[in-house]
Image (spheres, rainbow, N blue to C red):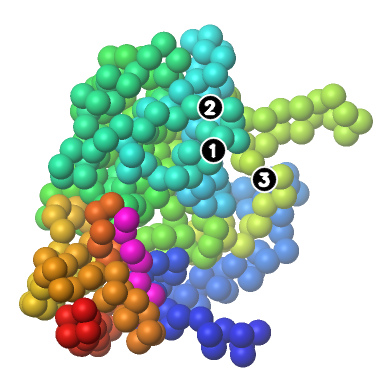
């Protein structure tokens, strides 16, 4: 196994700006030890393992407190953003069926909304209508409203969206959802455990959480910028009464009533323990320090890329996701990306617009000088070779 891993990208050296979220060796040790402490336990058995139930409840409560929930809010610990989004959409679907009489509900969302929403809708027998963006990559509220019809049950928005790293105008979309009697889900899988702390540092993070009128549900990944082990995520609801539409209950079999709030039956308890341990270890001050490191890295990254002849960082960028492209017709940015891959960097390619895509984490900060030196060399190579 260790031999096989030799072919992986060196994420500890900052060469993998996606998939892995790492802060310090000490925090990883805390996460691993907590995970292994609950390696065998099954989170399905809440009565058998009240310890797991306690940890899970406290993690959900911490998430609600961080993300604007009132005393009426509720939530569920899930295996990741995909399941969190799936459960939010399933809940909205069943809410629309029972409360609004819509048999095949629709979701209206900007084209930048995560592909997982499309996947969930496909599984759940729903339709998705995607609308064009404004020139600043944000959702166009007018186009969202124009796409709403009698079968629409949900509006979906991002905070921030993964393709472009910007926040949709959640307050405006919340007002629209409230006016039209629709469910609004906010995908904060990337921003949920980073944006509140960046705001505390003075960065202009717009309102996006459960405190915004009209927001019904929100997804936030603890295994991203919460730095817990995979898979750890939350789906939160502005009113826990909504969770009756999330829940699956079945009694017509010999073992009696079977009830789950998640897609999974048996669930690993390790990620729950990891999330609890990491959140309590870092605390508010620890997460704020991580946000400072990431946002400082963001400023250094923008300045460093824009010193390279022929490149520019695309604006706007609200948080931790950046894109840069080429303004030199002799420099194809994909050719630069391919050349960087040859040098051992994992490079994401954005399709629209054509650009390099990067999600910043603390582990990238020490690698910036090497990154800039290699990008500079790759740009020169592509320019000279056409």
CB contact under 8 Å: marks 3 and 1? no
Image quadrant assignment for residue 306: bottom left
Residue 331 visible in the snapshot = yes
Identify the residue under disc 1.
Answer: 120
Quadrant that contains the C terminus:
bottom left
Across and down, in percent, residue 64 comes to 40, 42
**Residue 323 falls within the magenta-colored stretch:** no
Quadrant that contains the N terminus:
bottom right
Residue at the image point whose x is 27% and y is 66% from the top: 356
Across and down, in percent, residue 36 comes to 63, 71
Residue at the image point whose x is 67% and y is 52% from the top: 267
Residue 280 visible in the snapshot = no
Upstream in the sequence, badge 3 or badge 1? 1
Find residue 126 and name its label.
2
Upstream in the sequence, badge 3 or badge 2? 2
Find residue 45 and name its label.
none
């Amino acid at each position: 196994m260790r031999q096989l891993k030799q072919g992986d990208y060196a994420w500890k050296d900052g060469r993998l700006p996606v998939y892995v979220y790492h802060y310090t060796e000490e925090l990883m040790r805390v996460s691993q030890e907590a995970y292994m402490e609950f390696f065998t336990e099954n989170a399905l058995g809440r009565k058998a393992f009240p310890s797991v139930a306690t940890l899970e409840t406290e993690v959900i409560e911490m998430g609600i407190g961080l993300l604007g929930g009132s005393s009426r809010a509720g939530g569920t610990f899930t295996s990741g953003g995909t399941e969190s989004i799936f459960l939010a959409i399933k809940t909205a679907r069943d809410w629309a069926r029972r409360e609004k009489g819509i048999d095949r509900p629709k979701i209206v969302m900007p084209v930048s909304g995560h592909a997982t929403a499309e996947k969930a809708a496909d599984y759940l027998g729903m339709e998705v209508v995607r609308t064009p963006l404004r020139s600043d990559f944000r959702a166009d509220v007018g186009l969202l409203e124009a796409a709403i019809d009698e079968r629409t049950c949900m509006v979906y928005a991002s905070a921030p969206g993964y393709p472009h790293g910007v926040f949709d105008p959640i307050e405006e979309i919340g007002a629209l959802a409230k006016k039209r009697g629709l469910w609004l889900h906010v995908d904060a899988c990337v921003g949920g455990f980073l944006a509140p702390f960046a705001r505390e540092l003075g960065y202009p993070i717009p309102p996006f959480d459960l405190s915004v009128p009209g927001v019904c549900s929100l997804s936030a990944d603890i295994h991203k910028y919460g730095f817990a082990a995979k898979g750890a995520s939350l789906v939160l609801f502005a009113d826990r009464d909504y969770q009756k539409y999330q829940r699956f209950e079945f009694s017509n079999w010999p073992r009696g009533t079977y009830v789950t709030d998640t897609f999974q039956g048996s669930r690993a308890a390790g990620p729950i323990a990891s999330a609890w341990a990491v959140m309590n270890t870092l605390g508010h001050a620890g997460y704020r320090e991580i946000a400072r490191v990431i946002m400082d890295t963001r400023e250094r990254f923008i300045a460093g890329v824009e010193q390279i002849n022929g490149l520019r960082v695309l604006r706007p960028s609200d948080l931790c996701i950046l894109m840069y492209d080429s303004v030199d017709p002799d420099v194809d940015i994909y050719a630069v990306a391919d050349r960087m891959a040859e040098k051992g960097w994992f490079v994401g390619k954005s399709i629209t617009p054509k650009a390099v895509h990067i999600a910043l984490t603390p582990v990238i900060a020490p690698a910036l000088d090497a990154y800039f030196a290699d990008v500079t060399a790759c740009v020169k190579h592509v320019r000279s070779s056409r």
